[in-house]
Image (cartoon, rainbow, N blue to C red):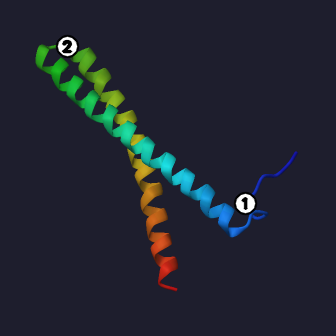
Amino acid sequence: MNDISMSGLDRNTKERLMFFIDLMMFFIVAISMFFLVLNAYNAGKFFGSGSMGYAQQSLFYMAGSLVFVTVSMMWIFVRFFTARKGLHR
């Protein structure tokens, strides 16, 4: 089986690849934030109307969106601080 690694790529190609991965993470954050707000709104709307089952389901969907936001933001912050550390060398 072929082992795919980034060790055979030059620095310019690695930076371009990481840029596209970072760009995808920003899109994931934007889409996840939209669904997080939408599901939080729906949970409140259903809770206000007395539909506890639908409110709970919306809260579970909200938690799922929060997981995507958390992982994506962690990737963005780690990349930001490692790039910042690289500039101070």
Residue drawn where x is 35% and y is 28% of the image: 61
* Residue in the foreground of this view, choosing between 78 and 34: 34
Give the foreground label among 1 and 2.
1
Whether 85 is drawn above or below 17: the answer is below
Instruction: Pick the quarter of the image with the N terminus.
Output: top right
Q: Which label belongs to residue 89?
A: none
Which residue in the protein does label 1 denote?
A: 6
Could you tell me if the residues under marks 1 and 2 are in contact, i.e. CB atoms within 8 Å?
no
Separation of disc 1 and disc 2 at Cα? 51 Å
Whether 84 is drawn above or below 36: the answer is below
* Residue in the foreground of this view, choosing between 20 and 45: 20
- The residue type indicated by label 2 comes to Ser
Chain-order first, disc 1 or disc 2: 1
> Residue 82, how many percent across, how many down?
50, 71
> Residue 38, how many percent across, how many down?
27, 29
Whether 77 is drawn above or below 38: the answer is below
